[in-house]
Amino acid sequence: MFSLKELLPSLLSAAFVMLVSSVVKELIPPVIRDYLFAIFRRRFTFIIKEKCDLDRNEIFEAATTYLRTKVTSDSTKCLEASKTIRQKKPTFDIAMGQEVLDRFGDIELKWKLMEKGDLTKQNRQVFFELSFEKKFEEIVRESYFPEIIRRSETIKKEEEMVKLYSRESGCLDGRAWRSVNLEHPATFEKLAMEPELKKMVKDDLDRFVRRKELYKKVGKAWKRGYLIYGPPGTGKSNLIAAMANYLKFNIYDLNISSRLSDLQLRKILLSTSNRSILVIEDIDRAAELNDRERRDELFTLSDLLNIIDGLWSSCGDERIIVFTTNHKDRLDPALLRPGRMDLHVHMSYCTMDGFKLLASNYLDINGDHQLYRQIEGLLANVEVTPAEIAEELLQSSGNSDDVVLAGLVKFFKQKKLEKAKTAKLLELLKSCDTDVYVDFEGFVKSFKQKKLENAKAEEAGQLLKSDDIDVEGLVKLFKKNQLLYSQLR
């Protein structure tokens, strides 16, 4: 049996509906009333969610871009304005709960941005309501939606803005990626790398983009894998930025150290868009993934590779994956399997061709120089990265070309001297008795520690010269600690 307390809300609601119904019948003439009801019955509404299953909703993203061209102070009461530090001008979007009218031929359409769910939890859903007269449903399905997608692609190409996506911690679905505009100046023309290698990478990218029908014909996923390897500072990140700028592909940066489950990783990877580059840096750290215990339910290297080879590659087009490493020799052989890493790109220490390009970029030297022959001989005998040379060029900016290049010659000679000392030390260690174990890494660490101690001693010496320091008190403290240490021994 229901109590009166439980039935009371339902009774009140029913009474209210009856009251409103009677008022409508009394105050609104039948002709007008029938006309209004007919209008409501003729309306049709599409719900366009931000995401569909594990993937992003292309119609939602296209509508967001498209409606930016429609929102004005005349078309809606409220706009959402935003501008990141890197953006050149503000972006204006439809605000939550607001409506925007659009026309497509003779059809009037009403867009409304809505949300439901707890704003502080992951069950929050954002969606568009698109309403129009029901008789135009087929036109909207077959013509209006494709036109929105086409227009949004045109807008993106006109903006020519490449985005860098990184994963937002705590968000484990399609909204996990947050983006900023990638305003990296790197281009293939400015990269300090071997001309033949540069041409090989560009040609490979061009072939990949234009072979859509070939990939489809042979039944192969339209993706390409690159392994970029070499010492730190040789330009691996710059090459990735140049690739993105060249193709106008967005970059998704995935941190493999993230504590994600296999399912969470799948959701995040499947929410990446077409025409994008998925970057996984320092893949030699994949050994950490293999060491994970399955009971922790964290994804392993095998999980990552299976997703990339399977679901991720088959649920989109024009996708590139890039692995980077400083140590190719440490990689798991599974990573180097044919069809997984299609092209291996070695970013080496700076050569003369790379140096001339850097000199052209920083000093506007486009021809020959009297010091180039000497520099070429030094570069052949030292290991110096483009990043090191670029730093030297930046520090010397403002000086004449002769002064800057002379400074670089001195820098290279110092590097050559250090290399000779290291080689001599290694030879000395090799000549030791075979029964004597030499921890060379520990040897290097001790040198670094000594250098740090010397720097601290110099800093302490400068401090002791200050009038604010009680030198006598410090001496007494040192003697007291020394006495205590001797007693403990």
Image (cartoon, helix red, strand yellow):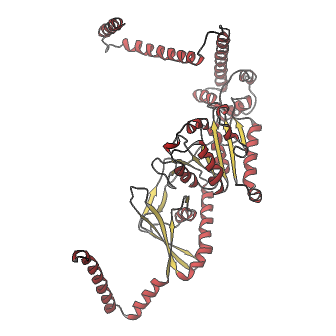
Q: Position of residue 64 (x, y in %)?
A: 52, 63
Which of the 4 quarters of the picture holds residue 78? bottom left
Between residue 215 and residue 298, name the one nearer to us: 298
Q: Position of residue 5 (x, y in %)?
A: 22, 75
Q: Position of residue 358 (x, y in %)?
A: 67, 33
Above or below 489: residue 403: below
Residue at image location 67% in from the left, 33% down from the top: 328
Indicate left or right for 339 with 425 as reference. Answer: right
Q: How many marks?
A: 0
Between residue 23 and residue 483, name the one nearer to us: 483
Q: Position of residue 165 (x, y in %)?
A: 55, 49
Q: Where does the C terminus fall, quadrant-wise?
A: top left
Q: Is residue 259 visible?
A: no
Above or below 164: residue 62: below
The extreme left residue here reads 4
Residue at image location 63% in from the left, 38% down from the top: 324
Q: Is residue 135 visible?
A: yes
Between residue 281 and residue 442, name the one nearer to us: 442
Q: Where does the N terminus fall, quadrant-wise?
A: bottom left
